[in-house]
C-alpha cells in the first residue's frame, strides 16, 4: 500500500476545507487501485470534513492533540474529543510544533501514548535541521527523536503506525533530499524500529516522506519500496498538485500489482 496524507496546516476555513475534501475524494473515484488517503484539516473543520469522508475509506487526521485527558488547559483539544468527532489519525511532533511551539520529545512521547489510548493512529514526524544535516548529525537526531518519542509505547500492531521523515530544511522550501538520501534515512528508520520492536510484523509501521513534495517529484519518491507514502503540505491544498501526486501513487501501485 501507499499512503498520501495531506496536512492542510492553518490554511483553510471550514467551507474551503469541505470543498477541498470533496475534490480530493473525487480524485479516487473509479480507481480500483488507489493509495490510502488521509486528510488533516484544521481542528475547526474536522466535524464538517468528517461528513464528507464518512464511509469513503479516506481517513480523517488531526494536526495535534493534547497530552492531558481533560481539565484546565485553555485552547487544547483532547484525544477523546478528537475521537468523538470521528478522527482516525493524528499528526504528532510536526516540525512546526517542535520549533514554533516548543514541543519536546518527552511531550511528544506523552501525546503518542494518549493518542493510542483513544485508538487514534499516530503520524509521528521526525527530521533534522539544516545545521544538523551539515554537521553529519541527521541520523543521530532522527534516532534520538524516534527512541524518545516511542519510549514505553506499545502500539497495537494490528493498526499501521506512521513515522514521517520530514527534514526541517525541506518543509515549504522547494528543496528536498535526493531519492537516495531518502532511501538511506528510511532504511535507517526501519532498523531503529526493528531494534525497538523486534517482534513487530513488517506491516506494523509505515514510513512516509514529507517536505516539498509536489506533482513532479512524488513518483520518484513513491517508486522506492521503503517509501510507504508521502506527508504532503502545500501541494495537498492545491488540487491539481494533489491530482498528480495521487496519479503517481496509482502508477506505482499498478506497476507493483
Ligand atoms: P510542504 O509539503 O509544504 O513542504 O510541507 C510538508 C509538511 O510539513 C507536511 O507535514
Image (spheres, rainbow, N blue to C red):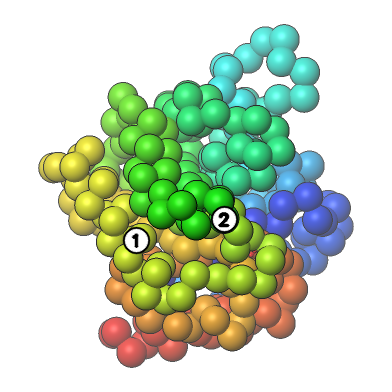
Q: Is mark 1 within 8 Å of ligand 1?
A: no
Dividing the picture into quadrants, the one containing residue 1 is bottom left
Image point 71% across, 25% down: which residue? 76
Residue 257 appears anywhere in the view:
yes
Q: Is mark 2 within 8 Å of ligand 1?
A: no
**53 left or right of 8?**
left
- In-front residue for pair 257/148: 148
Name the residue carrying label 2. 130
Picture coordinates of residue 9 (x, y %)? Answer: 72, 52
Picture coordinates of residue 5 (x, y %)? Answer: 55, 61
From mark 1 to mark 2, how far is it between C-alphas?
A: 18 Å
Image point 59% across, 85% down: which residue? 216
**125 left or right of 206?**
right
Name the residue carrying label 1. 186
Picture coordinates of residue 27 (x, y %)? Answer: 62, 79
**190 left or right of 44?**
left
Residue 51 appears anywhere in the view:
no
**Of callouts 1 and 2, which one flags the residue occurring earlier in the amino acid sequence?**
2
Vertical comparison of 71 with 67: above or below: above
Near mark 1 (Cα within 10 A), the count class, few <14, some 14-19 or many ≥20, is many
Amino acid at each position: 500500500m501507499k499512503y498520501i496524507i495531506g496536512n492542510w496546516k492553518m490554511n483553510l476555513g471550514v467551507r474551503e476545507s469541505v470543498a477541498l475534501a470533496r475534490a480530493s475524494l473525487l480524485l479516487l473515484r473509479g480507481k480500483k487501485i488507489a493509495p490510502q488517503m488521509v486528510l488533516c484539516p484544521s481542528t475547526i473543520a474536522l466535524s464538517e470534513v468528517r461528513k464528507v469522508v464518512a464511509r469513503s475509506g479516506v481517513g480523517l487526521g488531526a494536526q495535534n492533540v493534547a497530552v492531558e485527558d481533560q481539565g484546565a488547559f485553555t485552547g487544547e483539544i483532547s484525544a477523546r474529543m478528537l475521537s468523538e468527532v470521528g478522527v482516525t489519525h493524528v499528526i504528532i511532533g510536526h516540525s512546526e510544533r517542535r520549533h514554533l511551539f516548543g514541543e519536546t520529545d518527552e511531550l511528544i512521547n506523552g501525546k503518542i501514548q494518549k493518542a493510542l489510548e483513544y485508538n487514534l493512529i499516530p503520524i509521528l514526524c521526525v527530521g533534522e535541521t539544516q545545521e544538523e544535516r551539515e554537521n553529519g548529525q541527521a541520523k543521530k537526531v532522527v534516532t534520538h527523536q524516534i527512541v524518545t518519542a516511542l519510549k514505553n509505547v506499545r502500539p497495537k500492531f494490528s493498526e499501521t503506525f506512521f513515522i514521517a521523515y520530514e527534514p526541517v530544511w525541506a518543509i515549504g522550501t522547494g528543496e528536498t533530499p535526493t531519492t537516495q538520501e531518502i532511501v538511506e534515512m528510511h532504511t535507517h528508520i526501519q532498523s531503529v524500529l526493528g531494534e525497538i520492536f523486534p517482534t513487530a510484523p513488517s506491516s506494523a509501521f509505515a514510513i512516509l516522506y514529507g517536505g516539498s513534495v509536489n506533482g513532479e517529484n512524488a513518483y520518484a519518491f513513491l517508486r522506492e519500496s521503503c517509501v510507504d507514502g508521502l506527508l504532503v503540505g502545500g501541494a495537498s491544498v492545491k488540487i491539481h498538485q494533489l491530482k498528480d501526486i495521487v496519479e503517481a501513487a496509482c502508477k506505482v501501485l499498478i506497476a507493483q500489482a
